[in-house]
Each structure stands twice: as C-alpha cells, then as structure tokens.
Image (cartoon, rainbow, N blue to C red):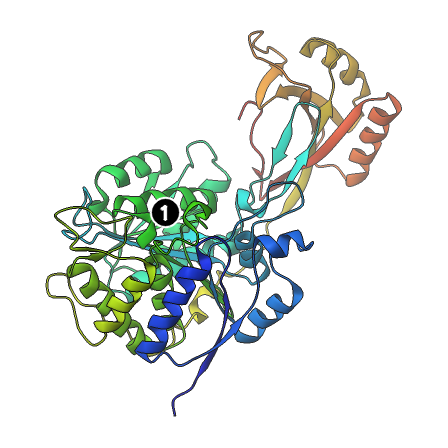
Amino acid sequence: MRDITPVTVARGDGIGSEIMDAVLYVMNAAGARLKVEEVPAGEAVYKRGHPGGLDAAGWGSIRRTRVFLKGPITMPQGYGNKSLNVVARTTLGLFANVRPCVSYHPYVRTRHPRMDVVIIRENEEDLYAGIEHRQTDDVIQSVKLISRPGSERIVRYAFDFARSNHRQKVTAFVKDNVMKMTDGLFLKIFYEIAADYPEIKADHMIVDIGAARLADQPERFDVIVTLNLYGDIVSDIAAQLTGSVGLAGSANIGETCAMFEAIHGSAPMIAGQGIANPSGLLMAAVMMLVHIGQGDIAARIHNAWLKTIEDGIHTADIYARGLGRVRAGTAAFAEAVVERLGQTPVTMPPVGYSTARPAYDRINRLSPRVRALKELVGVDIFLQWSGGLPDDLAELVLPLSTDALTLTSISNRSQRVWPDGNADVFCTDHWRCRFLAQHGPVQHGAIVELLGRLAAAGIDFTQTENLSNFDGKAGFSSPGQ
C-alpha cells in the first residue's frame, strides 16, 4: 500500500465548513492517500483567548503533520488579535506564497482570455512583520524590514519554480525609486540570482505601473516575484482578472511545513445557504497534493474540475447566461467533479503533475557572507514635542549637542524643516533630530551621553536609530527622504 500522508485540516468560519466538506469529498473519491486531523481554528478560538486563532493542540498537529489545509477565517476586530495567516507564515517559516492566476476562457467570463500568471510573494518580512508602535499623540509607526537572506530565498524560489514549471520569464515588482534601500536591496539580489538562470528572462517594474500593466495586459507576465505587501495586493488583482477570486488557491511554502488555502474570505453573508464555490479551496488542495507527492491524484482532480467547468456546471458566483449550463450549489458542484474523475477537458489543456515531492534545498543556498566594516557615525533621535515652530525646537536641542555628536537637521514626517526648511510643511508632534559625528566614528557611549542630556532637559524622546556606514557607504537615508 502506498504511503498515507497525515494532513491537518481546519474548516474555519463562515462558508468554511461547507466548502471543506466538498473538497474532502472530492479528494476521497479521487483516491487521495490522506490521514486527516481536524483542528478548530478561527473566530471561536480567538474568542477563547488565543490571539493567533489556533490553540496549542492545533499548532501541535501542524508541526506533526507539516501540512495544513485551511478554510477561510473570520478574525474578530480589536487589539491583541493577529491574523492566523500572518502568524502561521512567521511561526512555521512559510516564506513563499504562491498564487497561480489562470483564465478559463471561454467558460468563465474574463477580459483576458490568455492570462496565466503565477504571483510569488515573500511571506515573512516587509510591513507584514507587524512591528508597530504608537510614538506620539499624532503618529503611529509601522516598520518595514527587508533582509538579504529573506530576499535571496524568495527570489531563488521564484526562479526555481519557473525552471521546474517550464516558465519563460520572472518579473520583479518593487518601489525602489522611493524606498531605495529596502526595495533597492531586493532588486539588487533579484539580478544577482537571475544570473544563475540564464535560460529564464529577468526584468523588473515599479509596482504601481506593474500593477496597471498586469490589470491591462496580464498576458505580458509569466511569473511575478515581489515583496509581501505588494504581493498581497497584486495577487488579488490578478485573481479577479481571471473572472473570480473564488477560483484561486494559494500555497504557503516553507522548508518543513506548508499551508494551503483559498484566497477568498469567510463570506458569512452566504454561510449555510449551500451556494459557496469550493473551487478556490479545491485548487489549494490540488497544490497540497502536488506538494506531498500525490501529483497523480492532483491531476485527476484538476482535470475533472476543468471538465466540469467546460461542461457548464458553475456555481452562482461565476454562472452567466450563455456560459454556464447548470447553476450548481456547493455539494452539487462537488458531485459533478466526482462524476468526471478520470476525464480530461476537451477545449482547455489538460494538466499533469509529477509524483516526486518538490525539493527546497536550493533556496537556502545563500551567498557567502563577508562582513562589512561598520562604523557608527551618528544617531536619529525621534521626539514628541508640541512647543512651537521647527526653529524653536532647534533652539532647544542644539545646545544639547556634545563634543562627539552635533545636531545637523530636523525633519517632520520625513520632510526636512531645519535648517532652511519649507515653512509650508505641515508638522505633527513627531520630530526626527539627526546628530552626526564631527570627527570620525563614535562609540555607543556618545549616544548614551547625548540621551542623558536630552532627558535632563525634559525632552521626550521616543525612539533612536543608530546611523552607520558600511564599508564607507552610508547605511541610512538623507533627511527629506
């Protein structure tokens, strides 16, 4: 008997139970070799005091099976709760989000009949790291973190995916014209790794025009790799372009664990009516089966699903007169897929998958680390202050400079307001005072001395950021950037 793979399943909230029933029914009928462990997840678990939406037993099951098929989740609003998706991705090391976005012309209405794009998104870093602080009455900060190892892993995964799936091009979406250091690092790494894949074309676009081009001409793209926030937005745009977000599945891949889900929400307004489309979760299950080495079952289900769509058996969200023949509910749609197991589509191309488990050993082939010469040359000190104009703040702070560190500029909401600031800049109570070394690198004690002077003067500093040069190049942006 061939190996049976344990998987953790959470039905989730809203329509989750209905669509999960349909998906499990199809997989069982197709001969999927699974041992299902069901765990509670979602709104009820949040309300029992688990801020990640999953209790200890649920996390234990996932760490044991290393495969998680998740229904849509409703997260109660309020401080303290965290998105289960975000927590799972960071806790389990699910660094890559993979979303195939394919048009099913002429059976599902779309303006882009030749669309076949895969969005690969970095999953652990960027603004979605969730590092936020309220610093003053007026200002809340969210920290964007981009690392070299994290960028290398996701970019290499994208090129490996393209090579394994016979894709021709990988495009990076970035905003390096504004975020020159963070997005600039990602783009630099993108082209470094692209050199290892000479048979695959590599290019990049600024994310705003890239998203516009994707919405207008998606057939221009093949594989897109991007940062966390951009990828979340762009992948939903791409899914909708195919005709419905209800058709798209999503994989979250790590070295040891993986999570699979539909990209749509829990849709509580239609829960219990038996009309939800299980296709997104079913396509996620297909990706799961490929991941665990049951590509034969995955192809059997996927081809039956394509044949069902070809035959005009459509759920209400995609049904359109002239395209659909039967408006099917959730259970009836699943039954139609089961009836077509063993069949292949006639008009749309059939699919096939390998039965070998994907290997992820290359993703950790990080470039050799050569430690840079790091020199501490200053500090940005952020203040809460509402005492008047920028010149008034400078008059208060400038005398507190030390022999080692001197105030050189003040900015507010990234705009330089002293010296020679623009009087039209709207200022909040959150100020960045930049102190730079006047005579070469300084020691940390110089910053401690400076902070002591500020504290003694009754100035409310909320945060500090050390300013360092790396191999003689500034590792920080200029005032006004």
Residue 417 in percent (x, y) is at 61, 14
Residue 32 in percent (x, y) is at 36, 78
Residue at horizontal 58 percent and vertical 55 percent from the top: 87
Residue at horizontal 28 percent and vertical 62 percent from the top: 333
Taking depth in this image into account, of 205 and 30 the one nearest to the observer is 30
Give the SS element for disc 1: helix
Q: Which residue is mark 1?
A: 235
Residue farthest along the bottom direction in this orientation = 1
Residue 200 lies left or right of residue 343; in this view the side is: right
Residue at horizontal 22 percent and vertical 68 percent from the top: 303
Taking depth in this image into account, of 185 and 360 the one nearest to the observer is 360
Inspect the image, locate mark 1, and give the three-letter code of the amino acid beneath it.
Ser
Residue at horizontal 68 percent and vertical 12 percent from the top: 390
Residue 438 lies left or right of residue 324; in this view the side is: right
Res 226 seen here: yes
Quarter residue 359 falls in? bottom left
Residue 147 in percent (x, y) is at 54, 50
Res 251 seen here: no
Residue 247 in percent (x, y) is at 31, 54
Quarter residue 381 falls in? top right
Say which quadrant the N terminus sits in.
Answer: bottom left
Task: Work out whether 5 lies above or below 177.
Answer: below
Task: Work out whether 197 lies above or below 354.
Answer: above
Residue 187 lies left or right of residue 325; in this view the side is: right
Residue 64 lies left or right of residue 459; in this view the side is: left
Number of labels in the image equals: 1
Q: Residues within 10 Å of mark 1 (few under 14, many from 20)?
A: many
Residue farthest along the top direction in this orientation = 423
